[in-house]
Amino acid sequence: MFVMISVFVLDIVTVLLCNKYENNYQLTAETFDGGLGADKIHFLNTNNSDAILLESDGHFGLIDAGEGSDNPNVKARISGFEDKIIAYLKKVAGDSEGRVHLDFILATHYHYDHAGGFLRIINDESVSVERAYLRKLSVGLLRDYEKGSWQIPKIYTDLCEASKRLGIEIVQELPKEPFAFGSFTLQFFNTDEVTDPHFKGENDDTVGVKVTKGGLSAFLSGDISNVHGLEKKLADSIGRVDLLKIGHHGYAGASSAGFIKTLRPRIAIVTNWLGKIYPNVKWNLTMYSRSAIYSTVKCDGIAACFTDDGEIKLTTHLHAYYV
């Protein structure tokens, strides 16, 4: 009983603090008029799945593609978000005829709520992709259910075969050094082959992405967690950031105290409902970094605009203008 009461009080305190820190930032509805510049990270609303569009100086890259419509895990099958993402790509990245060119796609890992939408998206006749960052699947890392009912090897193989058929350059040895993407600098993390015997499961193979412009930076953490110590392994090399895409949808094993103390984001974005973030995650973010926490579901998508005068401006309701 004492534990339950403590968790309840903890949750109330963190919600109050989160609401207080949110007042530090003005949220405005996205209008797509370019008034905040050409460098944005678009966090799409795909419920508790990830789809993130990078935009910089006319260049576009799609990191994860949301839940797909044909999840091999029948028990988890829900309506996919491919049509919603394609419509958004045409609105934001399309030319006058709706043709979309993506510099790259990146599957942070091969769980269906991250990679499931890619097949439909890259096969759409209006979408062309130059490069696919598809890290080689570490089959030996997978849990039995990931190899079985979740069919992770098939998801990976199907995506590789489709990319090859479409003439997309496939990159499996991901670059370790930072590289330019328009006005952004991108750096991939967790790219080495996993050799730590304590690591287990596809989440431990998740690729993180650091996005930097001038003195501003964001870390997109996919499903990186600290269940087996991955956050501890990566934290120092990532360093301080201004914005964090909360790892693993705000579930308990991610956003550990040590990770948040090192990164200290002032803005945190979760691809989930706020109410589904675990209390310890909210506590770490509010107490150790005073983060303002925003939900892509509550806000119907969020764009983080990296302005030329060194600020991050947040816009919401990304999906309201194309329907």
Image: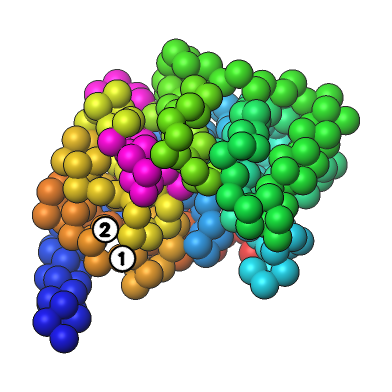
Residue count near mark 2 (Cα–Cα under 10 Å), binned few <14, some 14–19, many ≥20:
many
Out of 104 and 213, give the one closest to the viewer: 104
Q: Which residue lies furthest to the right in this view?
A: 165
Out of 208 and 82, give the one closest to the viewer: 208
Residue 53 falls within the magenta-colored stretch? no
Residue count near mark 1 (Cα–Cα under 10 Å), binned few <14, some 14–19, many ≥20:
some
Q: Which residue lies furthest to the front in this view?
A: 197
- Residue drawn at (25%, 48%), measured in percent from left and top? 256
Out of 290 and 25, give the one closest to the viewer: 290
Can you say whether 144 is above or below 189 in the image?
Answer: below
Quarter that holds the N terminus: bottom left
Can you say whether 188 is above or below 303 in the image?
Answer: above
Q: Give the range drawn in magenta.
A: 212-232
* CB within 8 Å, label 2 to label 1: yes
Amino acid type, mark 2:
Val
- Residue drawn at (49%, 43%), measured in percent from left and top? 200
Identify the colour scheme used.
Answer: rainbow
Quick one: SS at disc 1? loop
Quarter of the view holding residue 35: top left
Q: Residue 278 carries which label?
A: 1
Quarter of the view holding residue 49: bottom right
Quarter that holds the C terminus: bottom right
Quick one: SS at disc 2? helix
Q: Position of residue 263 (x, y in %)?
A: 23, 36
The residues tagged by marks 2 and 1 sit, at their Cα atoms, a distance apart of: 5 Å
Q: Position of residue 281 (x, y in %)?
A: 26, 58
Q: Mark 2 points at which residue?
A: 281
Amino acid type, mark 1:
Tyr
Q: Where is residue 296 in the image (x, y as percent from the top left)?
A: 43, 59
